[in-house]
Image (cartoon, rainbow, N blue to C red):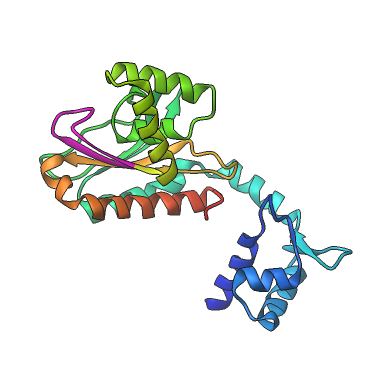
Amino acid sequence: MRTLQRALGILEIFSSERPSLSLQEIAERGGLAKSTAFRLVAALAESGYLLRLDDQRYCLSFRFTRLAALVQSTLSVRDVARPLMQALCDRTGETVTLNAVEGRYRICLDVVCAMSPLMSVTRTGARSPLVDGASARVLMARLSEPQRGRVITAAARACHQPRASFAREIEIVARRGWAVTHGERVAGLTAVAALVGDADGTWPWCLTVAGPTVRLQPRERELVRLVQQAAASASRQMGAPLA
């Protein structure tokens, strides 16, 4: 298992900024002894996942193109997120949603409902303005311009906040990748949301845990950690370039 993890770790070292690497660079960036790196790189090259270039550097092979095409044709973000959402619901005892941006709206792509008699109720396909609440804040935080500017302006106006201060709040959310709100969209409701990214380096979705403030607020730190972990796992599976 450790050998497999190391081999996969080598593949993740490559990026658009570092499309080719020397054996020494692979060893250093992977935290491996050079002999271990040599053995793993040789195995990956023999399996067709790495190519050795004329300058003795290595790069990923076109084999990943075929695998990526297969993934894109068979797997959706809902397929990836659903088991993570169920696990998050089981762990927190609260409702979990998968959300995306649709124009100036947040749309709920999937829901795993809590069994508690007092719970957040959201249905798949529900749309709400991209204005307030934790989900809206994280989704608008990573929009590209000029859409991001337009959405922030409209949201600040709807929330009766100066645009500059609202924009600063969204910048903080963008840097950390998560948001928490208490009673912002619905009185007595707390929501914790974290961004989910894709292979293109965009962040079009978020996972959100929502429930009564009386239950969630005392557990805020724990819930932030759990939602971040689930969102990071979904992002990795969707191919997002995580740090």
Secondary structure mostly seen in magenta is strand
Residue 57, picture quadrant: bottom right
Range covered by the magenta-colored residues:
179-193
> How many discs appear?
0
Classify 220 as above or below 29. Answer: above
Q: Residue at x 64, y 81 (%)?
A: 33
Q: Is residue 10 visible?
A: yes
Residue 89 in picture, x, y percent from top left: 26, 49
Classify 191 as above or below 107. Answer: below
Q: Is residue 148 magenta?
A: no
Towards the viewer: 72 or 151: 151
Q: Is residue 189 magenta?
A: yes
Classify 111 as above or below 186. Answer: below
Residue 165, picture quadrant: top left
Classify 243 as above or below 22. Answer: above
Q: Residue at x 75, y 57 (%)?
A: 61
